[in-house]
Amino acid sequence: MPFSAGEKHDHFASISKRRQPVRIKSWQSYLVFYTLLLGAAFLAVNFSQPKTKDEKRIAPLFKDLGNHHHAITTKSPLAQKYFDQGLILTYAFNHPEAIRSFKEAVRLDSTCAMAYWGIALALGPNINSSMDPGVIPEAYAMAQKANLLAAQVSENERGYIQALAQRYSLDSTIARETLDLAYANAMREFSQKFPDDLDAATLFAEALMDLNPWNHWDKEGRPDVDTPEIVTTLEAVLRRNPNHPGANHYYIHAVEASPHPEKALACADRLGSISPGAGHLVHMPAHIYMRTGRYYEASLANEAAAKADESYITQCNRQGFYPAMYYPHNIHFLWASASMEGRSTVAIDAARKLVASIPLQRFREFSFLEAFLPTPLFALARFSKWHEILAEPKPAPEFKYTTAIWHYVRGLVFASQGKADEAAAEQAQLLALAQNDTIKNLILFGGSNAAALLDIANHTLAGEVAGARGQIDEMIRELWQAAKLQDALPYIEPPPWYLHIRQVIGQALLKAKRPAEAETTFREDLEQNPFNGWSLQGLEQSLRLQGKREEADGVQEQFKQAWSRADVTAAYLSSCCSSDKPK
């Protein structure tokens, strides 16, 4: 039964006393704010009440989303199909399209309680977006409508409805975290009551993930308080249904930042074929492939995901949160994975396509998207395309972070040419921009502060300037400072900084004739980024310089395999040691 306002407050207060919710970190708060702005702009023009039966259908039926089925009480077989589609799309994080599917189910059967439940579910928070205050009234109304119809459905369906009712309130004095915790606790109780309902268990795990998104593991590999329960719950689902779209998706997120991301390789290997029309699910294997050194498979996953999303966006003429965020994420990820393969053409093309896919006005409206804007500059620098960098026009002054990166990559060019003073002048321009209040307050997509990234850029460029002046020890000191700053960045895939600094440090150590230290550094990078050719080649060289011939021969074979699709000759990264010659 619904609570009165006072009863709700007392009920949720008692829950909070039992277990205080984890507070969202500051960078997440900024990111949530921006995503809410983007989502609200979309919701204002795209969300309306369900249409009558005589009006045009609200959503199409897609043919390539898989066959996941959850039986509900409805007098319309077609409404059942739309409900199943809405649930799959919810698992695929295409929440706007899921809502359209659930609303079509309502249009077909206005007495279908679970269709209203689906709308309310998809309007709620998820790991990539907090609850938009602007849709709370609709989410609450849909949850209450489902509750009014609950008497005519099964006990199992009532469990879903009653649990979700605890997620929403019109009482603004109740904290969002308190409501989310109440929902998670209710879903735990419900899923335990119905242990054969795998969707209940999956949604319970997601509810726990929403309490502290993207913070399931700390930097030392220790799990968050809820992480063990999330992992064991999803593993139990996957043992019984290895092809569950939601469980595979959430399990990848649950373990990707853990010390053992390979635990999700089975999920990664099958998820793309479970729902081939759901672009984000097709993309998700890349998160695990990237962490386990399967960079080519990561590229394939993102190419397929981009193709699926392009088809969806074109056919349905979709705008809003999904095409604005998830589609560019595929392309951004492709540039990162291709760069780890040494495929410069694919990586640079993807970087340029990424920027072209986002209208310039959107960069102006949503400043966190500026994370994507300098990607072509990063791609050119990654592959030492010095002439191309100098041909790049200066960004518009309103994009201060991108302008600072433009100065950074130009500094790399001059350092590679031995022009230390010119490189230092570019560094000075970078530092001046980094002091701007806009930069200091800019939280980019993925949660990193722009000033923190420019701090890494500054120390990296300072190291290159020192290298250009022959001050190799100073170069190494500056690069290690950059590496420490990089280590402190929040986890996200692809990583927030384009370059793994230890790869550069290793090359500098080789230049300083310190091969033992170089070996250690390259091995450290390979622990973080397994089987990458950039460090494998450096490791081979460091071993040979120490007379470890047999071990070097083995690493050389690994390098040949890792670099088998590369179109560049050398895996050098430091501008003072780099090669710009094609294969």
Image: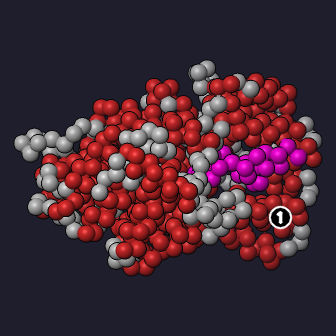
Query: Is residue 578 or residue 371 the one in the foreground?
Result: 371
Image quarter of the N terminus: bottom left
Q: Residue at x 58, y 47 (%)?
A: 24
Residue 556 in the image: above or below residue 147: below
From the viewer's perspective, tell me whether residue 315 is left or right of residue 532. left
Q: Residue type at mark 1: give it.
A: Glu
Q: Position of residue 93 (x, y in %)?
A: 39, 52
Q: Residue at x 80, y 77 (%)?
A: 550
Query: Is residue 126 or residue 551 the one in the foreground?
Result: 126
Residue 249 in sight: no
From the viewer's perspective, tell me whether residue 175 is left or right of residue 310. right
Residue closest to the far bottom: 240
Q: Which residue is mark 1?
A: 519
Is 301 contained in the magenta span? no
Residue 40 in the image: above or below residue 535: above
Stretch of the chain drawn in magenta = 477-503
Q: Position of residue 418 (x, y in %)?
A: 84, 35
